[in-house]
Amino acid sequence: MAPVGEGPILAGDIGGTHARLALFEGGSAEPTAIEVYATREHRGLGEIASAFLAAHPAEPVAASFGVAGPVRDGRTDAVNLAWEVDERELAGRLGIERLAVINDLEANAWGLEALGPGDLSPLNDAEAETGGTTALVSAGTGLGEAFVTRGPPGLRVHASEGGHADFAPRDQLEGELRAWLAERERHVSYERVCSGMGLINIYDFLLQGSGAASDPLAEARSGGDEAAAITAAGLERRDQVASAALDLMASIYGAQAGNLALTVLATGGVYLGGGIPPRIDARLRDGGFMRAFTAKGRMSGLLERIPVWVILNDRAALLGAARHAERAVSAEG
């Protein structure tokens, strides 16, 4: 085994749709090798990581993988993944002693301090409180949440599964949406209305309510990535229902981001991560997101003073996983 602090770091961002793996050297923010794999085309993370190291031979001194879903004692529960991940089994298969499996949002949160101004797009250009708690709400295949606190020991990242909290409708339309979903799902969470699957659900609900005889996006949706087809049609405003679905999801996203900001008192700011926010950044700027974010009655003034950013760098979780692994190496040094 290479001495502590010498050798490459293996980092992974494992989502429900894609698995990104990269090698980093010497604390660099630029990977020496990176690959993206379709998660469902493989039987597990061990297979993916083995293929990556076969393509890019290396002897990592440490590895960290941010994996979608809750992690307990180094094991994941398959929520948005087709398979489970076991930290000990993976370490043995890859021959990496210092290996950790953490929640994907925890990895993303570790990457926040590695982001520069060009990696962020401000939605609410307020001033962050120095040392204040920061929150992360990521919309992609699912809806993930995490938050970061700072104190005498330094930065501490807290994983969360708040995306699976009960969806709370704010008006009649959202109440009807919830009732429609409750007929189809055992549990109607925020993830069911604020994610890739959430956008599909909202579109189908609004399409049914529109009285349309057929789905105008049926051909585009049959291509495989239904959420992308709906997003494209909505952003281009060539389909009224798709456009309305984007607006409704953006508003729900803002409401839940505001809920998390209040829950953890995120005076250090709120970050919007995942694959969806950068794609719909222009629609988030239409105002619906921030109106919902700040619509908290007596707490509205507090929310108006909290900065909000869209993360544009799709490697944030990879950078965070690398930082997590480097921290483990440094702790032993």
Image (spheres, rainbow, N blue to C red):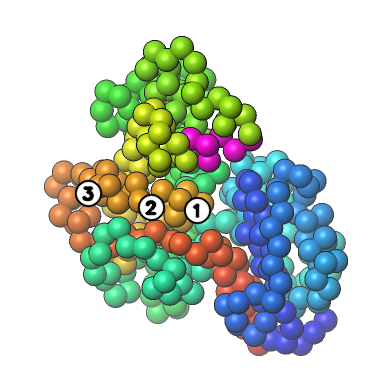
Pinpoint residue 125: horizontal percent, then vertical percent.
Answer: 25, 64
- The answer to whether residue 114 is visible is yes
Q: Earlier in the sequence, mark 2 or mark 3?
A: 2
Quadrant into which the C terminus falls: bottom right
Q: Tell me the element at label 1.
A: loop
As drawn, the label of residue 281 is 2
Q: Whole-Å distance between the Cαs marked 1 and 3?
A: 22 Å
Q: Tell me the element at label 3.
A: helix
Q: Nearer the viewer, mark 1 or mark 3?
A: 1
* Residue beneath the point at 62% across and 51% down: 15
Q: Whole-Å distance between the Cαs marked 2 and 3?
A: 18 Å
* Residue beneath the point at 53% across and 61% down: 314
Q: Earlier in the sequence, mark 2 or mark 1?
A: 1
Q: Nearer the viewer, mark 2 or mark 3?
A: 2
Between 7 and 96, the one nearer to me in the picture = 7
Residue 270 vs residue 19: left or right? left
Q: Nearer the viewer, mark 2 or mark 1?
A: 2
Between 223 and 105, the one nearer to me in the picture = 223
The correct choice, above or below, for 99 with respect to 46 in the image is below
Label 1 near label 2: C-beta < 8 Å? no
Say which amino acid is labelled 1. Gly
The correct choice, above or below, for 16 with respect to 305 in the image is above
Q: Is residue 332 magenta?
A: no
The correct choice, above or below, for 172 with respect to 36 in the image is above
Q: Earlier in the sequence, mark 1 or mark 3?
A: 1
Q: Which residue is mark 1?
A: 274
Q: Which residue is mark 3?
A: 294
Q: Which residues are magenta?
A: 224-230
Category of crowding for the residue at label 1, using alpha-carbon neighbours closer than 10 angstroms: few (below 14), some (14–19), many (at least 20): many
Quadrant hosting residue 246: top left
